[in-house]
């Protein structure tokens, strides 16, 4: 019989901004959503680019045989309903359109902007 294993990550405050460095800029998350703040060719900070509503990684996931790794994602939709989805890491090995499609289907507000999608 197969059992799923879930490792809970450190709990974070929903109100504390989260910052992650990436590609000459950084992602920042606050109560309004996930943003990317990049820099121009002169190193000046660009205006924040909205990516999606707040999205949290709450756990690492895998199957009982230490395969099928993923991340348990959590967010609140526009109706105030909390959603969770165990996203397989394998879906990130392409252009991630399947990830965006599933998150949108489940109620995460995502920017339709091509620049935001291409990050």
Image: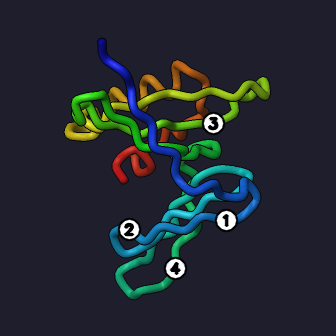
Q: Is residue 58 left or right of residue 3?
A: right
Name the secondary structure under disc 2. Answer: strand
Residue at the extreme front: 1
Q: Is residue 65 above or below residue 45?
A: above
Residue beneath the point at 72% across and 51% down: 32
Quarter assignment of residue 96: top left
- Label 3 crowd bin: few (<14), some (14–19), many (20+), radius 10 Å: many
Q: CA distance from mark 3 to mark 1?
A: 15 Å
Residue at the extreme bottom: 42
Residue occupied by mark 4: 45
Q: Is residue 69 left or right of residue 108?
A: left
Quarter assignment of residue 60: top left
Q: Earlier in the sequence, mark 1 or mark 4?
A: 1
Residue beneath the point at 30% across and 12% down: 1
Q: Nearer the viewer, mark 2 or mark 4?
A: 2
Residue beneath the point at 43% across and 71% down: 21
Q: Earlier in the sequence, mark 3 or mark 1?
A: 1
Query: Mark 1 near mark 4, Cβ–Cβ under 8 Å?
Result: no
Res. 22 mark: 2
Q: CA distance from mark 1 to mark 2?
A: 16 Å
Q: CA distance from mark 4 to mark 3?
A: 28 Å
Which of the pair 36/17 is nearer the observer? 17
Res. 17 mark: 1
Q: Earlier in the sequence, mark 3 or mark 2?
A: 2
Name the secondary structure under disc 4. Answer: loop
Q: CA distance from mark 2 to mark 4?
A: 14 Å
Name the secondary structure under disc 3. Answer: strand
Residue beneath the point at 35% across and 37% down: 70
Residue 48 place in picture, x, y as percent: 58, 64
Q: Nearer the viewer, mark 4 or mark 3?
A: 3
Q: Is residue 35 above or below residue 118?
A: below
């Amino acid at each position: 019989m197969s059992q799923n294993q879930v490792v809970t990550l450190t709990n974070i405050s929903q109100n504390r901004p989260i910052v992650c460095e990436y590609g000459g800029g950084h992602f920042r998350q606050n109560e309004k959503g996930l943003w990317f703040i990049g820099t121009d060719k002169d190193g000046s900070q660009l205006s924040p680019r909205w990516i999606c509503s707040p999205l949290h990684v709450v756990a690492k996931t895998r199957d009982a045989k230490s395969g099928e790794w993923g991340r348990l994602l959590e967010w609140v939709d526009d109706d105030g309903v909390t959603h969770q989805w165990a996203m397989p890491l394998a879906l990130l090995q392409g252009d991630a359109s399947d990830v965006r499609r599933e998150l949108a289907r489940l109620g995460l507000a995502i920017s339709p902007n091509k620049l935001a999608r291409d990050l």
